[in-house]
Image (cartoon, helix red, strand yellow):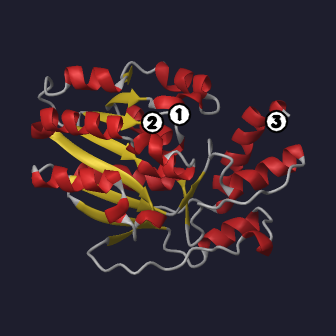
Amino acid sequence: MDKATILGVFNFVSFHLCKTLLNRGIEVYGVSIGDMEQISFHEEKRLEVGRNANFIEASLEKLISEAGISASKQTLILPVYDFYMLNHDRTLLNDYVIGTLREYINKSKAELDIMVILPMQLMDHEKKSPVHRLIRQVKQKSVPVQKVYLPTIYGPWQPSVFLFQQAIMSTMQKGKLSGAEREWRGDALFVDDAIETMIELMETGNPGEYLLESGQDNYWRMCADYLNIGQNHIEQAGKPHQMNRHIVRTPVKKVTALADSFSQQIGHTRLFYQNQS
């Protein structure tokens, strides 16, 4: 892989993917989409990656104009996970974006791989999603597709829709936990651990479906206990999915210790949020 294109590049998982790929010398086209450009600390994130000469911020229109020109192998990353967690599914899955992506894929298919990053919650609802319809069309054109399902992801830049970030912020701003309706509470992964495994999957180029796991029993609960999140906030814990098709259960290569992972998230939150009250 010589190049990666990431949609919604300034969102949570997308931004960490972008930084890690840049650090590995990969050229990254970062695409902002619609009102998601107004996400928290957008300019701070842009400055952080903008210093890297391999980062190019692009529009969907620019992607189309340059599609098929490069002969180098590239990966298109569709982070449905970020949009789903922020309840902005329609921003990513509207007719214009899907139509533009279809055109881009048609022009670039000879040198293109695709990774779709999905929340666990959509594992049972793939037929209802526009992005899955797009994936089925892409597969018919023999473009390799990897679908990666994620549980709760935490770490620096975690949005406040997640309970972990709410708990951290409540210790600084005396706020209350409002809950997280879309959060999967059956497992959790530190973002750096998840990114490391996703990039390894990208480098294999092997198409298929993958479920990233911590390999730890009740790990989301362990994280919640570390942050003193009470039992009353976990009533909608994740339920086991019936995997009636071939999905590769993939434990992350490394599980960073809770004290180390949460110290990073807490320190980052203090740096960027404490003065916002």
Give x and y (percent) for residue 244. Answer: 31, 80
Name the residue located 27 percent from the left edge and 37 percent from the top edge. Answer: 99
Distance between the Cα atoms at labels 2 and 1?
Answer: 7 Å
Q: Amino acid at mark 2?
A: Gly
How busy is the neighbourhood of tag 3: few (under 14 within 10 Å), some, or many (20 plus)?
few
In the shown orientation, is residue 106 left or right of residue 184? Answer: left
Q: Nearer the viewer, mark 3 or mark 2?
A: 2
| Left or right: 276, with 217 as reference point | right
Instruction: Judge whether residue 103 can be spotted in this image.
Output: yes
Q: Which residue is mark 2?
A: 8
Rendered view: 106 above or below 210: above
**Residue 268 sits in quarter:** top right
Q: Secondary structure at mark 2?
A: loop
User: Which dot marks residue 36?
Assistant: 1
Mark with earlier residue (3, 1): 1
Question: Which of the two residues, 23 or 243, is positioned nearer the viewer here?
Answer: 243
Q: What residue is pinned by disc 3?
A: 274
Q: What amino acid is found at the position of numbered circle 3 in the picture?
A: Gln
Residue 173 is left or right of residue 159, and the answer is right
The C terminus is located in which quarter?
top right
Residue 89 in picture, x, y percent from top left: 47, 48
Q: Answer yes or no: do the residues labelled 2 and 1 have beta carbons within 8 Å?
A: yes
Q: Is residue 198 left or right of residue 189?
A: left
Which circle, 3 or 1, is nearer the viewer? 1
Residue at the image position 65 percent from the left and 73 percent from the top = 236
Q: The N terminus lies in which quarter of the figure?
A: top left
Kind of element beneath mark 3: helix
How many tags in the picture? 3
Q: CA distance from mark 3 to mark 2?
A: 26 Å
User: Is residue 253 among what the camera can see?
Assistant: no
Q: Is residue 226 above or below residue 2?
A: below
